Image (cartoon, helix red, strand yellow):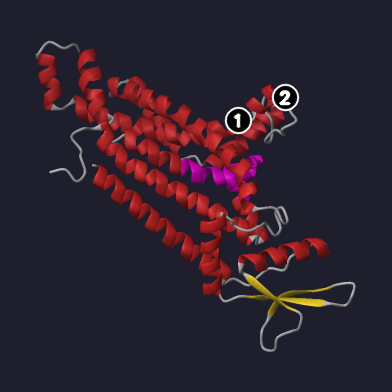
Amino acid sequence: MWKYILKRIGLALLTAIIILSLTFILIKLLPPQRFIGTPQQRTAYYNNEVRLGFLYSSETELEGVEYVDHLIYEDKTEIFYYKTPVMQQYISWIGNILTKWDWGTSQKIEPNVEVTVIMGARLLTSMKINILSVIVSVPLGIALGIWAALKKNKLTDHIISTAVMVLIALPGFVLITFLILLLSYKAGWLPPQWPSPTDTLAYRAKGYILPVFCLSLGSICGYCRSVRAELCEVMESEYLLLARTKGLTRGQSIIRHALKNAMVPIFPSIVAEFIGILGGSMILEQLYGIPGIGTLFIKSMNAQDYNVLFVDMAIFTTLGLLFGVLLDMSYGIIDPRIRMGAR
């Protein structure tokens, strides 16, 4: 098992390096954007890019080479900034990360601020919303699935199954738009947008209700449908009938045997669902004004702030691969019969 885990971690790291390398090269092949700001801000940004190895400067214009930008100072001195070759930038990028953990600075979102600093607070906000969504969706979805399975082909089962079919097809961005109009603007119960840090604690707590509910709803429906299907199949198996013939009550046989076996394919999906929620929160963050990495991704893409965009993509890629490894590991943890690499 340990050999398999180490192998999966190694493959995940290799995949991350390949994805991030290709992303970096493709982004650097795009036409460079000129820095918009005061002369001091422009000088600071370009000098930092020179330090990172992405640009080089010259006091004279080089023939046949297109410059990124040039600055003219009060003493009439001119500095021209040119792009270094892409592969040279790639080598510099690897060296900067490995030796200094330097990912560059923002060009337009927050000029001359390190992108790791920009990501810090925003990542925490996105993670809190997504973790709360998982905490809400998992118990509710599993409970509804068990209830529907125990009431199979009865009115309760039909009501739950119909509601799941309708709600699972409802996009989260449509739902949150409707709820903002209904519960915020008309009823006035919830904040119409993400509260600011200066608002009261109670008001900020209310700000979590709409995004968490909209992110959780699809997962609740998915868990409910999966748990119902698995539990109904397990309840019709022969070993469960054997447990009943040995004297166990229906409740005992379900709790001791049916639920454990039905959870084997369900539990790993919780890890996979978190990845889906993280990606789905991108649009909801934009609609609700949440200062998370999803909003930052769209903003940096529209502003063509490539350093911020790259680090944002790196976070999504790394989290996806990390939870993919945890997903593979969870199979062997939840069911001792599953041991990858064992004889």
Residue at left offset 44%, top offset 39%: 274
Q: Amino acid at mark 2?
A: Thr
Viewer can see residue 319: yes
Q: In the image, is 263 to the left or to the right of 124?
A: left
Q: Nearer the viewer, mark 2 or mark 1?
A: 2
For disc 2, the marked residue is: 200
Q: Amino acid at mark 1?
A: Tyr
Which quarter of the image is occupied by the C terminus? Answer: top left
User: Residue 78 or 38: which is nearer the viewer?
Assistant: 78
Q: Position of residue 35 (x, y in %)?
A: 74, 65
Q: Residues within 10 Å of mark 2 (few under 14, many from 20)?
A: few
Q: Are marks 2 and 1 in contact (CB under 8 Å)?
A: no
Outermost right residue:
74
- Predominant SS of the magenta segment: helix
Q: CA distance from mark 2 to mark 1?
A: 13 Å
Residue at left offset 50%, top offset 43%: 278
Position above or below: 54 against 191: below
For disc 1, the marked residue is: 208
Q: In the image, is 122 to the left or to the right of 12?
A: right
Position above or below: 211 against 250: below
The kind of secondary structure element at disc 2 is: loop
Position above or below: 157 against 244: below
Residue at left offset 25%, top offset 47%: 4
Viewer can see residue 36: no
Residue interval drawn in magenta: 276-296
User: Residue 239 or 66: which is nearer the viewer?
Assistant: 66
Answer whether residue 241 is magenta in the image. no
Q: Position of residue 264 (x, y in %)?
A: 26, 33
